[in-house]
Image (tube, rainbow, N blue to C red):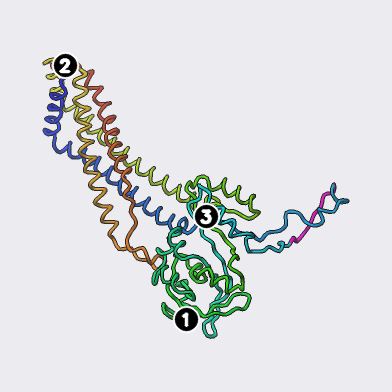
């Protein structure tokens, strides 16, 4: 089998029907191009939404949860041991928000090989005071640089920086919603009060905006020692330990282990964001389904064009077989035509998809909820381009294979008699 000769005949056939060949190639181009655009945009959007939630969520969160006692005092009375006890209107037990032995726990966790890093927090409930205005506040005492490293805090700062907060002992990174209500800006001072009644004046070193209005109206960041001072507590007072681990899949098992080991509540990232991850998976599934449908439709278009091409080339097929070409040779002529269409159309589709993706990526996208986002999100993952090109070749191969089977079985004597 002379593949070079067969390929030459395939190119001659395609060039004699330039319009039909171009239409077939364009069908592949638009199918692959649309697939690249849709996958890049949908996964870019998923990445943006994931970032809003998952970047701000620790892999494991250790804290003391307020909840009713698992065993009520009445259940501990011996004479009621074998009786069915019903207790109504159970009240939560008194829980110390401080994590017992927090500093030794953090030292132990830092030494574990599966832990990538951790940060301590002290959450202070209180108020922002501005003249006669008093707003509810949730002040998070933390290490600003660790929040920047592990939880991308700097990406949500619209004015100021994490470095400014670290340098300013009595500084505060104020939520944009709270700043607007208090009519204050960077460089101004705001008085804050804890629920214990301690009042301190803090300098606003930056404005923070998460994209969730309810959070931005109350939440702010301060230095860890300042949070402990507001509560009148010592340096070992820690209410939350946030842990980042190397393997995210191990978070549920490790959370269960740490909860039992330290007698605290441990929430893993999968549990905390189960509903969000489900929505993200469904969006990805829909985008794949629509994209694959486009590719299949393009494949059927190629099949129809090649099928018609075979009927138009009956005389050529008869001449080829009469001059010594086998049915197998004829089959490969038409398969190679399909693969040429797939390669040319697929390559143009990749260029089209990339070009449109770049245009979308540079299209302005501004919203008050996400001030740090300036353009539409696009994911340029190379796997979409590899999948697109591979699918174009596979689809066109099968689109050419079935019509070529018909050409392989054509009897040249019947065609010549018909003429």
Q: Is residue 348 above or below residue 241?
A: above
Residue 233, label in figure? none
Q: Which residues are magenta?
A: 82-90
Q: Which residue is the site of mark 1?
A: 189
Label 2 residue SS? helix
Label 3 residue SS? strand
For the residue pair 169 and 202, the one nearer the viewer reads as 169
Label 1 residue SS? strand
Occupied quadrant, residue 265: bottom right
Q: CA distance from mark 2 to mark 3?
A: 75 Å
Residue in view at x 12 percent, y 34 percent: 15
For the residue pair 22 and 332, the one nearer the viewer reads as 332
Which of disc 3 and disc 1 is earlier in sequence?
Answer: 1
How crowded pointer 1 is (Cα within 10 Å; few <14, some 14-19, many 20+) is rated as: some
Residue in view at x 29 percent, y 35 percent: 300
Which of disc 1 and disc 2 is earlier in sequence?
Answer: 1
Which quadrant, please, contains the C terminus?
Answer: top left
């Amino acid at each position: 089998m002379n593949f070079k000769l067969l390929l030459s005949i395939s190119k001659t056939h395609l060039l004699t029907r330039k319009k039909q060949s171009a239409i077939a190639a364009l069908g592949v181009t638009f199918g692959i191009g649309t697939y690249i655009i849709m996958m890049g945009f949908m996964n870019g959007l998923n990445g943006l939404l994931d970032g809003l939630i998952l970047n701000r969520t620790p892999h494991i969160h250790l804290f003391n949860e307020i909840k009713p006692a698992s065993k009520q005092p009445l259940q501990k009375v011996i004479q009621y041991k074998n009786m069915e006890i019903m207790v109504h209107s159970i009240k939560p037990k008194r829980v110390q928000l401080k994590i017992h032995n927090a500093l030794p726990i953090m030292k132990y966790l830092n030494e574990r090989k599966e832990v990538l890093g951790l940060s301590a927090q002290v959450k202070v409930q209180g108020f922002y005071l501005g003249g006669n205005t008093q707003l509810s506040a949730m002040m998070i005492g933390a290490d600003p640089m660790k929040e920047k490293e592990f939880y991308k805090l700097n990406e949500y700062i619209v004015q100021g920086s994490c470095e400014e907060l670290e340098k300013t002992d009595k500084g505060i990174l104020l939520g944009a919603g709270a700043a607007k209500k208090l009519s204050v800006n960077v460089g101004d001072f705001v008085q804050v009060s804890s629920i214990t009644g301690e009042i301190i004046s803090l300098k606003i070193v930056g404005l923070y905006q998460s994209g969730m209005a309810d959070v931005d109206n109350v939440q702010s960041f301060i230095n860890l020692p300042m949070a402990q001072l507001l509560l009148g507590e010592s340096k070992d007072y820690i209410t939350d330990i946030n842990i980042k681990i190397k393997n995210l899949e191990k978070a549920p098992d490790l959370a269960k282990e740490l909860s039992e080991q330290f007698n605290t509540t441990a929430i893993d990232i999968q549990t905390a964001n189960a509903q969000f991850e489900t929505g993200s998976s469904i969006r990805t599934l829909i985008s794949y389904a629509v994209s694959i449908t486009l590719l299949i439709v393009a494949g059927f278009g190629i099949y129809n064009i090649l099928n018609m091409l075979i009927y138009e080339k009956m005389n050529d097929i008869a001449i080829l077989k009469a001059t010594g070409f086998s049915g197998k040779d004829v089959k490969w002529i038409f398969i190679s035509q399909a693969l040429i269409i797939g390669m040319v159309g697929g390559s143009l589709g990749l260029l089209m998809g990339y070009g449109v993706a770049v245009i979308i990526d540079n299209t302005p996208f501004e919203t008050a909820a996400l001030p740090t986002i300036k353009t539409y999100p696009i994911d340029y993952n190379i796997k979409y381009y590899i999948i697109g090109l591979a699918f174009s070749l596979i689809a066109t191969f099968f689109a050419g294979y079935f019509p070529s089977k018909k050409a392989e079985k054509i009897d040249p004597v019947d065609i010549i008699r018909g003429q």
